[in-house]
Image (cartoon, helix red, strand yellow):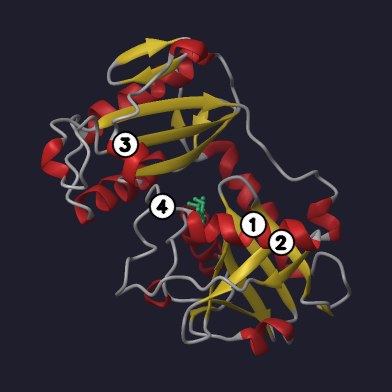
Amino acid sequence: MIYVNGEYFEKENAKISVFDHGFLYGDGIFEGIRVYNNLVFRLNDHLLRLYESAKTIALEIPISIEEMERAIIETVRLNKLPSCYIRLVVSRGYGDMGVDPRKCSKATVVIIVTQINIYPPELYETGLAVAIASTRRMRDDMLSPRIKSLNYLSNVMTKIEMNRQGLADGIMLNAAGYVTEASVANVFIVKKGELITPPKSVGLLEGITRNTIIELARDAGISVKEELFTQFDLYNADECFLTGTASEVIPVVSIDGRILGENKAGPLSRRLLEMFRSRTIWDGTKII
Ligand code: PMP
């Protein structure tokens, strides 16, 4: 069952207008949320990010954050999937041609609950081969990648480029050459026992998984720095991993053909994946 503007529809009947500005102009925002065994992981963080994205693009979400939370829980409950993926989309809504958002009187809210697409388990041991993408990530002062918007073309372009090379993912730099993030995941490196991830200001989506890993690491006494770094630092890292709702914590073992460490999941990547998975067992909003 799919939620569309307060009503539930079967998959075949869940529809929005071709005049929706989300379709016509990519004018909208979304969230990807995961449910582990009837617990929605970090739902509040996802909702806060959604409402902040909305505020940034001056999009008025027609329901309150509490109503949204209830709608999400109800949609998951109706779908009877104890572990699943939630795609929440809010677009500018139905309106005439022309980018002016005043043409759209009410935002469209869609909640889709599906099975989750994940990497095969062995990849968490063998790790991913990635490359630096030729598409550059927008700087935070251009069109902030902190907005989780319906404009994912740089991410799609990165994916197309990596598919052609037979690689799992690509890492995007910003225009100044600093590492930002992968196509749908944040990036961490390990150097001399320290964890380093780019700061939000470099131009990236502030991942909920990224923030969870920073928290878990600090609680465990591991040093974490949010610091600018370049391609050089990636090639010479002791370990590297990507974080995201779908991928959790997945090791990277090769970047542009440069092998990292022992060409398999490094000790800190493994430890953090374990800590992250232990957290998902109890930390979440219950589906009743
Ligand atoms: N960066 C981008 C561009 C993404 O689309 C995602 C996936 N939402 C992430 C990073 C990881 O964020 P999260 O941990 O919240 O899934």
Q: Which disc is residue 151 wearing?
A: 4
> Residue 142, how many percent across, how many down?
31, 72
Type of amino acid under label 3: Val
How far apart marks 3 and 2 lie (CA) works out to 29 Å
Which residue occupies the foreground of this view, 173 or 116? Answer: 173
Is residue 272 at least partly visible in the picture? no
> Residue 269, how many percent across, how many down?
71, 65
Residue that numbered label 3 is attached to: 90
Type of amino acid under label 2: Met
Q: Residue at image x 42%, y 42%?
A: 31
How far apart marks 1 and 2 lie (CA) works out to 5 Å
Residue that numbered label 2 is attached to: 162
Instruction: Determine the image quadrant of residue 102.
Output: top left
Q: Residue at image x 73%, y 87%?
A: 236
Q: Quadrant of the C terminus?
A: top left
Instruction: Determine the image quadrant of residue 191.
Output: bottom right
Please rate how many residues cluster around mark 3, counting C-alpha atoms within 10 Å: few if below 14, some from 14 to 19, many from 20. Answer: many
Please rate how many residues cluster around mark 4, counting C-alpha atoms within 10 Å: few if below 14, some from 14 to 19, many from 20. Answer: some
Q: Are marks 3 and 1 in contact (CB under 8 Å)?
A: no
How far apart marks 4 and 1 lie (CA) works out to 14 Å
Residue that numbered label 1 is attached to: 159
* Marks 4, 3: nearer the viewer: 4
